[in-house]
Image: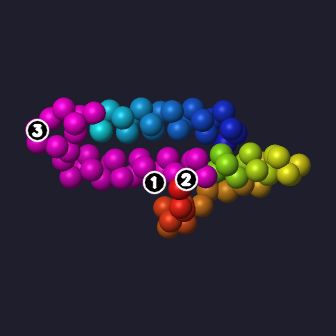
Amino acid sequence: MDDAEIIRRIGELADEERVLEEAHATTAQGLSEEERDRLEQLQVTLDQLWDLLRQRRALRHAGRDPEGAGERPPETVEHYQR
């Protein structure tokens, strides 16, 4: 997956995340369990994609092949400090 494809995928998932969050904010009943699970999955996947994009950019900046970057597991990206 190249940078453009990663960015495109981030945009798609962010749009879906926004729809779920807006639905939660505008309804009195909140999100269903399925929707909450999907929202959590989206957040983890977005963190993984942002991490992958940062890795690719760092490798490129260091004069190395960005294809050497790899998706890290949720346990890793979810514990980064922001």
How crowded is the residue under tag 2: few (<14 C-alpha within 10 Å), some, or many (20+)?
Answer: many
Q: Quadrant of residue 9?
A: top right
Q: Residue 18: x, y in percent?
A: 36, 35
- Asked if 37 appears above or below 3 in the picture, the reply is below
Image point (53%, 56%), residue name = 82
Dot label at residue 28: 3
Label 1: element kind:
helix
The span from disc 1 to disc 2 (Cα, nearest Å) is: 6 Å
Q: Earlier in the sequence, mark 3 or mark 1?
A: 3
Dot label at residue 48: 2
Task: Tell me the magenta residue range.
Answer: 22-51
How crowded is the residue under tag 3: few (<14 C-alpha within 10 Å), some, or many (20+)?
Answer: few
- Residue, disc 1: 44
Instruction: Kindly indicate whether the residue at mark 2 contacts the one at mark 1 (C-beta within 8 angstroms).
Output: yes
Compared across the picture, whether 38 is left or right of 74 comes to left
Q: Which residue reaches farthest right?
A: 63
Chief secondary structure of the magenta span?
Answer: helix
